[in-house]
Amino acid sequence: MSEEQREFQKKSQANGYDRDIWSVFKIMGELVEGYDKLFQIGPCISIFGSARTKSDNEYYQLAIETADKITQKGFGVITGGGPGIMEAANKGAEVGKGKSVGLGINLPFEQGINQHVDPDFSINFNYFFVRKVMFVKYAQGFIVFPGGFGTLDELFESLTLIQTRKIDQIPIVLFGSEYWSGLVDWMEKTMKEWGTISDKDTDLFHVTDSTDEAVKIICDFYSQKEPMPNFYF
């Protein structure tokens, strides 16, 4: 390696180190802001789903109805704060006069926080993983509507944390059997047969097409247990 190459490598490493150290402080800042705003928010349910779902879609309307009903049971609603299912869930929380929380993510192709999020509970994140910590830590359950990669990411992260006992078990509801049946069948017929999950792992979630049943699953779970924030340990 020439002297010029060594000097270039040295400068690159120094710049990379500085950037990495600075990013640690930015991550800490996002965690502190999230903890500060959400620490005393009370029991909430995270509602996930596609940002691409239009307002005339059946699931958009069902998300409004579900969020409305869950707030009437004393829960707030946490979403990713964006459009589609997230907007519908925040709208439902607003209709039900419950807490409407939006944990947004800075992306070049999304519109930002929707208008139905309470400004006191609106946070924008730069880091997906910090945002997911907030979803898991401060939600006492998940209702998952049809969605894309982001929705699946959030679903499987929560299932993994419960499966590995990094967090306490919380109710997880997959809403829309037509959408989720293929994934559930694959878990049953492929993952179980290959031995990559246990027989009981599919007991960690429920599938329904009923807003009333989705709410009942959450409420039944907490009829025997006080809702508490989750913690990584």
Image: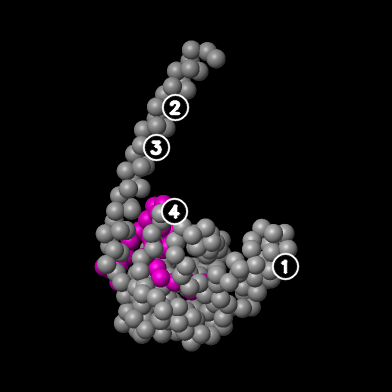
Q: Which residue is mark 1?
A: 189
Q: CA distance from mark 4 to mark 2?
A: 26 Å
Task: Identify which residue, 63 or 116, lies in the foreground.
Answer: 63
* Amino acid on which disc 2 is placed: Ser
* Amino acid on which disc 1 is placed: Lys
* Amino acid on which disc 3 is placed: Asp
Residue 231 left/right relative to 84: left
* Amino acid on which disc 4 is placed: Phe
Q: CA distance from mark 2 to mark 3?
A: 12 Å
Q: CA distance from mark 3 to mark 1?
A: 43 Å
- Residue mark closest to the camera, 4 vs 2: 4
Q: Which residue is mark 2?
A: 12
Give the magenta-colored segment's residue range.
116-145
x%, y% of residue 85? 47, 73
Residue 138 sits in quarter: bottom left
Q: Which residue is mark 4?
A: 129
- Residue mark closest to the camera, 2 vs 3: 3
Q: Residue at x 43, y 59 (%)?
A: 132
Q: Residue at x 69, y 59 (%)?
A: 195
Task: Identify which residue, 138 or 226, lies in the foreground.
Answer: 226
